[in-house]
Image (cartoon, rainbow, N blue to C red):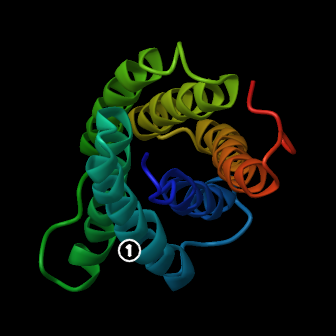
Amino acid sequence: MDKTANPAPLGLMGFGMTTILLNIHNAGFFPMASMILAMGIFYGGIAQIIAGLLEFKKGNTFATTAFISYGCFWLTLVALILLPKLGLAEATPEGFMGWFLCLWGVFTAFMFFGTLSAPRAMQVVFGSLTVLFFLLAARDWTHSEALGRIAGFEGIVCGASAVYLAMAEVLNEKAGRTVLPVG
């Protein structure tokens, strides 16, 4: 019997909280700041990679792929923002960023199909993330501020759904019963 802890809530919280913060920015509530970048490195990036490595040890290919991939997404996104500011690389044109985000949308769409036999809460996380990536790609291709704000609000919902799923897993396990339903 496997007595190791469930690493998924750690990865989900790293993803969810970082996603909420970035998308509060995307929705236009505050400018990009070191808080978002630091969260992207340490909680969205490193914590998710750790969760993915722990899921690997548990034999969960889906969670390993998801957490390590999205952890690397956060580290890459922070690098794309910081490298030009540090004079180490040219800034990526918005159109190219659109393709970057589109590819993540395609990856996430495939991962969404992997959730169709999973609890509804996980489907919401991956479904809303798929929509978010495509909205952000469309924003970058069209230079539409309105699309960026819509994506921001949708991203807050996406991040909140991941936080909910994480807390449901923690509280349900701790209580030994369903405290927060996951469907």
Q: Residue at x 50, y 84 (%)?
A: 34
Amino acid under label 1?
Ile
Image-based side of 175 in relation to 45, left or right:
right
Q: Residue at x 68, y 44 (%)?
A: 165
Instruction: Classify the position of the C terminus by image quarter.
Output: top right
Q: Residue at x 23, y 75 (%)?
A: 84
Q: Is residue 170 above or below residue 110?
A: below
Q: Residue at x 40, y 29 (%)?
A: 108
Residue 60 pos. (x, y %): 34, 38
Image-based side of 38 in relation to 125, left or right:
left
Instruction: Classify the position of the N terminus by image quarter.
Output: top left
Image-based side of 56 in relation to 135, left or right:
left
Image-based side of 70 in relation to 163, left or right:
left
The residue carrying pointer 1 sits among few (fewer than 14), some (14 to 19) or many (20 or more) residues within 10 Å by Cα, namely: many
Q: Looking at the picture, tell me which residue is in the foreground, 16 or 37.
A: 16
Residue 74 pos. (x, y %): 37, 60
Number of marks present in the image shown = 1
Q: Please, what secondary structure does the residue beneath circle 1 have?
A: helix
Residue 71 pos. (x, y %): 35, 57
Rendering quarter of residue 18: bottom right
Residue 38 pos. (x, y %): 46, 80
Q: Looking at the picture, tell me which residue is in the foreground, 177 or 15.
A: 177
The residue that mark 1 highlights is: 41
Residue positioned most to the right = 179
Q: Is residue 181 above or below residue 34?
A: above
